[in-house]
Image (cartoon, rainbow, N blue to C red):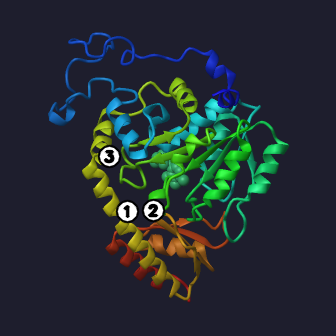
Amino acid sequence: MEDIASLVRPEIYAMRPYTSARVEGDQSARIHLDANENPYAPFPGGPEQEGLNRYPEPQPASLLSRFSEIYGLPVEQIFLSRGADESIDLLVRGFCAAGRDGILITPPTFVMYETAAEIQGARVCRVPLVPGSFQLDVDAMLAACDADQRIKLVFVCSPNNPTTNAMERASVLRLAAELRGRAMVVVDELYVDYSGRPSLAREIADQPNLVVVRSLSKEYSLAGERCGITLGHPEVIGVLRRIMPPYPLTVTAIRAIDAAISPAGIAYGRRNIARVVAERERVREALLRLPAVIDVLVSDANFLLLRTEEPRRLCAAMAEQGIKLRDRSSVIEGAVRVSIGTPSENDEFLRAFELCAPN
Ligand SMILES: *Cc1c(COP(=O)(O)O)cnc(C)c1O
C-alpha cells in the first residue's frame, strides 16, 4: 500500500533485516548444527526444560494461525511481540525518524507512548482529552496534524488508562478516515474485552492506516509471560517484522500463550473477565456510598478511577495496610487508580478504605 509505505522511515526499507539461523534454511532438518546452541538441556533437565536450549521460532506459525482465527484477520496482518510495550516501541521506531517526525497523544493517557517517542528522539504533540467526558477532541487532533505534517503516529487508548472509558467508535473511525495517507492511527485496545464492545480490528480492511494493539497481559492473565499482538495492514506488519528483535517470544512464553489461546483457554479467560466485570460494578457501587469518595468514573476496563480529597494521604495509609493503589493525582486532580482484584481482595480493599479515608 503506497499510502503506508510513504509514512515509514525510508531507512527501514533501505536496510537489510537481520536473519537468524531459525529463519534461514530448512527448519525441518534432522540435526541442527547451525545456531551454536548447546546440545544439552539446561539444569535440572526435566521435561519442563526440554527445548529451552534451542532458539524459538521468531513468529510461531501455530500461534499466528490461532490468532488469525480469534481476530478474524489473515496471518500477514498479525505481529507478535514481547508485550504491547514492545509493539509500541517498534511502531515508533519504524515510523518516526529521530528529530524529524512526531507522535500525537491525548493526555491523560498511558505514558509509554511518550516514553517510546523520547527514547527514539521523536517529537510529542499533546491534544488533551475533552475535560469531563475524557473523549477524543477529534477536531483539535486533526488541526494539530494539519499544523504539523510530520506527525506519523496518533495514539488512541481505548479503553483509556487511566480514565477507564472507551473512546467513541465513530470518533476513532473519523480520525482514521481523515488522516488516511498522512498518519497512522494506533488504537491501544489492551482492555477492550472488559468493555463488552467490539474491537476495531475488523475496520482495518476499510481503514488501512488503522493499527490495533492487543495483549494477553490484562485480559488473559499472562502479564508475566509477555505477549503483545499487533493487528494492521500487511505493510505495517512487514515493517515490524523487519525491525523486530530476532526472537521476541521465549520458548516458555510460546507454550503458555499456546495454552491460553486454545479454545479451553479462551473460555477460561472469558469467565475470568466476566468475574472481574461483575466485581468492578460491585466495588464501584460500594465506593460511591463512601463519604470520602467524590466520584468514580464508569469503567470499561478492569480498574476504577476514583476521586477523593486527599489522594496522597489515602494511598499512603492504604500502603500501610499492605494495599497498593496508584496515585494518579498528578495527572487528574484527586484521582486514585485501583485495579479490580479477587472478591476477597476487593472486600479487604473496601474495609481498609473505610478506615483510611477521611470522612
Ligand atoms: C499495561 C498496558 C500496556 C502494556 O501491556 P503489555 O502487553 O504488558 O506490554 C499497554 N497499553 C496500556 C494502555 C496498558 O495499560
* Left or right of 44 on screen, residue 57: right
Which residue in the rendered view is the most extreme toward the left?
46
Q: What element carries label 3?
A: loop
Q: Label 2: which residue? A: 194
The tag earlier along the polypeptide, 2 or 3, is 2
Which residue type does callout 2 highlight? Tyr
Q: Can residue 299 be seen in this view?
A: yes
Residue 35 pos. (x, y %): 33, 14
Q: Quadrant of the N terminus?
A: top right
* In this rendering, position of residue 62 left or right of residue 109: left
The amino acid pointed to by label 1 is Ile
Q: In this view, does 189 lie above or below 353?
A: above
Label 2 lies in ligand 1 vicinity (Cβ under 8 Å): no
Q: Is residue 341 visible?
A: no
Query: SS of the residue at dot 1?
Result: helix
What separation in Å lies between label 2 and label 3 (alpha carbons)? 17 Å
Placement of 299 over or under 177, stated as above or below: below
Give the CA separation, mark 2 to mark 1: 6 Å
Residue 48: percent from left, percent from top: 19, 36
Contact (Cβ within 8 Å) of mark 2 with mark 3: no
* Helix, strand or loop status at disc 2: helix
